[in-house]
Amino acid sequence: MVDFALAYQHIFSKATLFATGTTGRRIADATHLPVHRVLSGPYGGDQQIGSKIAEDKMDLVIFLRDPLTAQPHEPDISALLRLCDVHNIPVATNLATAEALLRALETGLLDWRETVHQTDEEE
């Protein structure tokens, strides 16, 4: 994730970034970008990110994971991905999709999210 953040720092610099503990620290140290850090994933960070999704405070999620390694907090990860589906939040779990989402963000293809925010404010 750190290498990815470095490669796309010019796009990430225009966004508000949230990350779980260790990942957020590593990204901030490498890129010098401000990163709002929550707890580490296994300690509830995934659920904290999930609450931001449910509150419509996330426009996209990049959650890179190794599909060949079991995660001790797999139920939390599944819940996070399910929340993205429920709330129509674009989500990437691999580098190819993450790059596609960032390119879409860069070119304005995710600007429809602004309409979602405006609709939420009117309700």
Image (cartoon, rainbow, N blue to C red):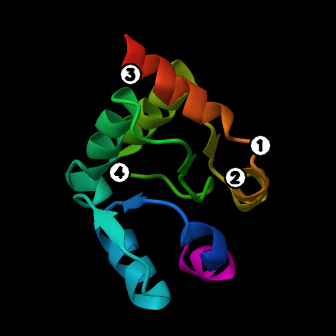
Question: Is there a contact, CB below 8 Å, between mark 2 and mark 1?
Answer: yes
Q: Which mark is residue 121?
A: 3
Amino acid type, callout 2: Leu
Q: Which residues fall within the magenta stretch?
A: 1-8
**Image spot of residue 81 (x, y percent):** 51, 34
**Image spot of residue 61 (x, y percent):** 53, 47
Residue 45 appears left or right of 18: left
* Residue 46 in view: yes
Helix, strand, or loop for circle 1?
loop
Q: Quadrant of residue 109?
A: top right
Viewport quadrant of the C terminus = top left
Which comes before the other along the chain, label 3 or label 2? 2
Amino acid type, callout 1: Leu
Question: Is there a contact, CB below 8 Å, between mark 1 and mark 4?
Answer: no
Amino acid type, callout 4: Pro
Which comes before the other along the chain, label 1 or label 4? 4
Q: Residue at x 43, y 52 (%)?
A: 71
Q: Which residue is mark 1?
A: 109
Discs 2/4, front: 2
Q: Quadrant of residue 54?
A: top left
Marks 1 and 4, Cα distance to the nearest angstrom? 35 Å
Magenta-span inclusion, residue 6: yes
Q: Which residue is mark 4?
A: 72
